[in-house]
Image: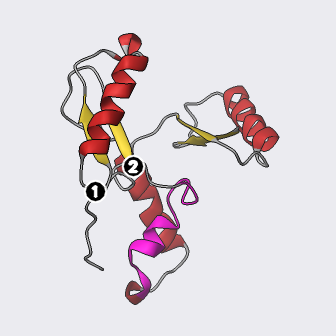
Amino acid sequence: MRITFSGREDRRIPRRVLRDMHDAEDLTLKNKVMTLNIAFNYGGRAEIVDAVRRLVKDMVPETKIDEKAIRARLYHPELADPDLVIRTSGEFRTSNFLLWEIAYSELIFSDVLWPDFRREDLFAAVKEYQRRERRFGGVDT
């Protein structure tokens, strides 16, 4: 399993923690079967702001700014967008999570609290997902 971390690395995070995070990423870099992406000090809006800052830093001309250019500057553009997002705890919001990446994800909302979420709850969510007809947008910007 490959381990990645998504989020800002700022001065509030102890250097030791950052070093351990980088060590885990380096140690698992060549693993290809699965990826565990840990959102640590992460916010979806911050990720988009950071991507735009990289566009500016890279001096990308306005005419070359499109979804592909923005996506390339997200924290982990190589990771596939999720097909399904399960939101637990009875909340009906995304909570600033993967705002760019979940544009075409199917969302399932569960009243079950995360610590109590079990195999049966996952199976129910997947069954609901399988009943849905996936539709994707077609607007290019």
Looking at the rendered structure, the kind of residue marked 1 is Arg
Which residue is the extreme one toward the top? 116
Task: Please tell me which residue is depicted at 27% across the width and 75% down the height of the picture.
Answer: 138
Magenta segment's dominant SS is loop
Residue beneath the point at 49% across and 35% down: 41
Coordinates of residue 21 in the picture (x, y in percent): 69, 34
**In the rendered structure, are the residues bearing label 1 and label 2 in contact, judged by CB atoms less than 8 Å apart?**
yes
Disc 1 to disc 2, C-alpha distance: 9 Å
The residue at the far bottom in this view is: 63
Among the 4 quarters of the image, the one containing residue 33: top right
Q: Which residue is denoted by mark 2 in the rendering?
A: 83
Residue at 30%, 41% in the rendered image? 129
Please tell me whether mark 1 or mark 2 is closer to you in this view.
Answer: 1
Q: Position of residue 57 (x, y in %)?
A: 53, 71
| Residue 7, disc | none
Tell me how many marks there are.
2
Please state the extent of the stretch shown in magenta in the rendering: 64-79
Q: Regarding mark 1 in the picture, which secondary structure is present there?
A: loop
In the image: residue 107, left or right of residue 39:
left
- Density class for disc 2 (Cα within 10 Å; few <14, some 14-19, many ≥20) is some
Vertical order, 70 against 104 (above or below):
below
In the rendering, at what x and y percent does residue 80 appear?
A: 51, 55
Residue 103 rendering spot, x and y as whole percentages? 30, 56
Q: Is residue 27 above or below residue 17?
A: below
Q: Is residue 35 magenta?
A: no
Label 1 sits on residue: 134
